[in-house]
Amino acid sequence: MDSIASSSLSSCYHIIFTSLAFILSGLIFLLTRKTKSKALRLPPGPPGWPVVGNLFQVARSGKPFFEYVAELLPKYGPIFTLRMGTRTLIIISNAELVHEALVVKGQVFASRPRENPTRAVYSCDKFTVNSAVYGPVWRSLRRNMVQGMLSSARLREFHNVRSMAMDKLIDKLRAEAQSNNGVVRVLKNARFAVFCILLSMCFGVEMDEKTVEMIDQLMKKVLTVLDPRIDDYLPILSPFFSKQRKIAREVRKEQIETLVPFIEKRRSILKNLESEPNAATFSYLDTLFDLKVEGRKTTPTHPEIVTLCSEFINGGTDTTGTAIEWAIARLIENPEIQQRLFEEIKNTVGERKVDDKDLDKMPYLNAVTKELLRKHPPTYFSLTHAVMEPAKLGGYDIPTDANLDIYLPPISEDPKVWSQPEKFDPDRFMSGREDADITGVSGVKMIPFGVGRRICPGLSMATIHVNLMLARMVQEFEWSWYPADGKIDFSGKTEFTVVMKNPLRAMIKPRV
Ligand code: HEM
C-alpha cells in the first residue's frame, strides 16, 4: 500500500534520466546548499547523490522496494533515511519506534504526506479516509465509514452478501477444477469473491458477472496509473511524462463515467426501495449522498463519491485476496494443520455450510488466521504517515515534509518477541505460549493493520472475510500442491500488496 513499496521503479527510467539529473542536480545543489544545511539530525542512511539522493540506487537495484529496505536493516538499524529526490523517507522497523510514533506521540504522527499530482486527482485532493490530513475532514470521513458500514451491527446486516459470494466462490472453484484437471488459481478467485462483496456493500445495486468483471478491470487500471513514477520524486522531470499524465486523466474520466450511473441508479432506488426487490436495503453510497463533512457547506460531488467508493472497494480487495493466497499455500505446506482445521470445522458445524456466526466458535481457525497475518502481512509497509509539526523519533528529527514508512515484517518476526518466528505455527496462539493483540493497544507485537489513530478501519470486516473464506474453502475441498512433486516458493513480489512471486495454483479435491 505504501506508495514506494507498491511498485518497483522501471529500470529503464534511470538510463534516460541519469545524465540529465546529474546536470540538474549539480545546479540545484548549488542553489539549495544553504537551506539544506539547517542543522536537522535525521536518522542515518546510505549516502546518495545530490538532489536525486538514493532514487537511482533503489531503481537500479532491480529489487522490490521491500527487499531493498530489508538489505539495509543490518547496516543502518531500525530507523534510517532514504532520500528519494524531493522526498525524504524515514523508515522504521521495530516495535519500540512504532510505539513511540503511533501510540505515545500518536496525534503528532497521525497525518499523511503531500500527494503526487496523479494521486491528488484520484483522491479529489485528499478527500479520502486514507489520504486526508489528520483533521476535521479525515474525522468526518472515517467516522462515516466506521459507523455507517463497519460497526459490528452493520457488518451483520451484510451476512447474506457474504454468504452468496462464498457460494459463488465455491461454484467457481469447482467449475475451474473440473475443466482444468483439478487445478485452480487461488488469488484470482479469492480476490474476485471479496471484490463482489465489497462492490455489493458499496453500491447496493444488482450487477451481473460481466459488469462486476468490467468494474474490476477498471479498478485494476486505476491502481496501475497510481503506481509512482520517477517524476513524483523529481518533479523537474515532469515535462517528460505528459503521455502518462494524459493516460491518468483518461482513466480517471473512465472511472467517473463508469461509476456515476450506478450512483444515480442507487439514488433513484432509494426514492422507492420497494420497487427494486433485489436491491440491498443499505449501502455505503447511502451514507455518502447527504454526508456532512466538518468545515464544508456542501455534500460530496459525484467525483468525490466515486473516489470514496473506490477507496472502500480497493482497501479490502487485494489485501484480503493476498491473505487467502498465502494461507492456502501454508495449509498445503502443512497438511496436518489443514486436517486439524477441517476437523474443527466439521465438529463445529456438522454437515451444513460454515456461516458468519460459527467463526467465533472456532479457535483454531482464528489462530490460523492470526498466524497468517503475523507471517504474511498482506502489505509489508503500513500506509505512509507524516507529522503534523516537527517532531522527534528515537532521538532523531522528523521534519513535517518527511514520509514516515513502517516496515512491518521485522516486527512480527522479531526473535526477541517470538519463538521460532520463521515457523508457520498457529499452535503458538492455542497453547497460551504466545499471544499478541492485533490492534496493538496492549503492545506492538504484530500490526498487519497498523496501530493508533490511523489503524485500518476494515480490521473486523477483513478478519471475517479471511476466516469465512478459509473455512469455506477448507470445508469444501482438500488442498494440495500443483504440480504434485513441486516445491512451494514462498518468496513474494509487490503488486500493490505482497503476493506470491509465482501465483499459487493448487489441486483441489471435493471433500464429499
Ligand atoms: C486483510 C485485509 C487488510 C489489511 C491487511 C489492511 C491493512 C491496512 C494497513 C496496514 C493500513 C494502514 C494503517 C496506518 O496508516 O497506520 C490500512 C488502512 C486503511 N484500510 Fe485497511 N487493510 C485490510 C482491509 C481493509 C478493508 C476491508 C477496508 C475497507 C473498507 C480497509 C480500509 C482501509 C482504510 C480506509 C484505511 C485508511 C485509514 C486511515 O487512514 O484512517 N482495509 N489498512
Image (cartoon, helix red, strand yellow):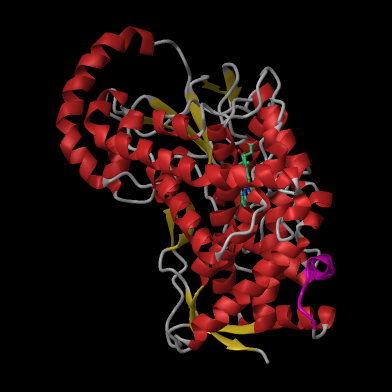
Quadrant of res 442: top right
**Residue 502 x %, y %:** 41, 68
Reply above or below: 465 against 248.
below
**Residue 364 x %, y %:** 76, 71
- Residue 321 shown in magenta: no
**Residue 303 x %, y %:** 53, 34
Residue at 65 percent of width and 46 percent of height: 266
Number of numbered discs: 0
Reply above or below: 340 against 396.
below
- Residue bounds of the magenta highlight: 352-363
Q: Is residue 103 at least partly visible in the picture?
A: yes
Quadrant of res 428: bottom right
Image position of 57 (left or right of 124): left
Residue at 59 percent of width and 25 percent of height: 133
Residue at 79 percent of width and 46 percent of height: 151
**Residue 162 x %, y %:** 70, 64
Which is nearer the eye, 432 or 257? 257
